[in-house]
Image (cartoon, rainbow, N blue to C red):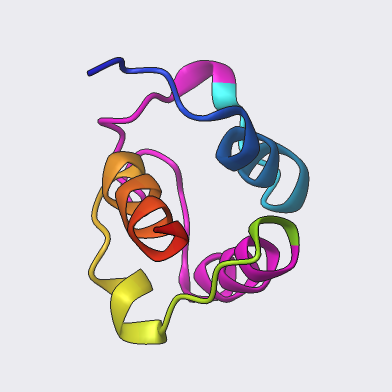
Amino acid sequence: MSDTISPELEAILREELQVDTSRIDRTSHLIDEVGLDSVGFAVGMVAIEEKLGVTLSEEELMSCNTVADLEDAVLAKRG
């Protein structure tokens, strides 16, 4: 599997959460490396729903430790 983040998720991280996506990849830890906090997770949850049409529960989102976990959760919901 590639370490490249999907363009859609990368756009959310960059545009909605103000993350420097040039310094992260799929293995990056959402809290320690990406820098998300509780507000960031909330903003991300709304942006994922609006831009990708996927609704993640708070529990699903909080269980994501890495960018890959988040991307996998979104893909699983997309079906």
Position of residue 6 measured from the top left corner of the image (x, y, whole percent): 51, 30
The answer to whether 6 is drawn above or below residue 41 in the figure is above
Position above or below: 33 against 3: below
Say which quadrant the C terminus sits in: bottom left
At 46% from the left and 59% from the top, the residue drawn is 78
Looking at this view, is 66 or 73 the one in front?
73
Residue 13 vs residue 5, the one in the foreground: 5
Instruction: Determine the residue positioned at 50% across, 69% down.
Output: 41
Pick the residue in front: 36 or 46. 46
Could you say where residue 74 lies in the image, as x and y percent from the top left?
43, 57
* Residue 43 drawn at (x, y percent): 65, 69
The percent position of residue 75, horizontal first and vertical second, equals: 39, 51
Q: Does the magenta-highlighted stretch encompass residue 78?
A: no
Say which residue appears at 41% left-offset and 18% top-offset. 4
Residue 48 included in the magenta stretch of the image:
yes
- Image quadrant in which you'd find residue 53: bottom right
- Left or right for 39, reference 28: right
Q: Report which quarter residue 24 is drawn in.
A: top left
Part of the protein shown in magenta: 22-50
Measured along the vertical axis of the image, is residue 33 above or below residue 74? Answer: above
- What residue do we see at 69% from left, 63% from top? 47
* Quadrant of the rendering where the N terminus is positioned: top left
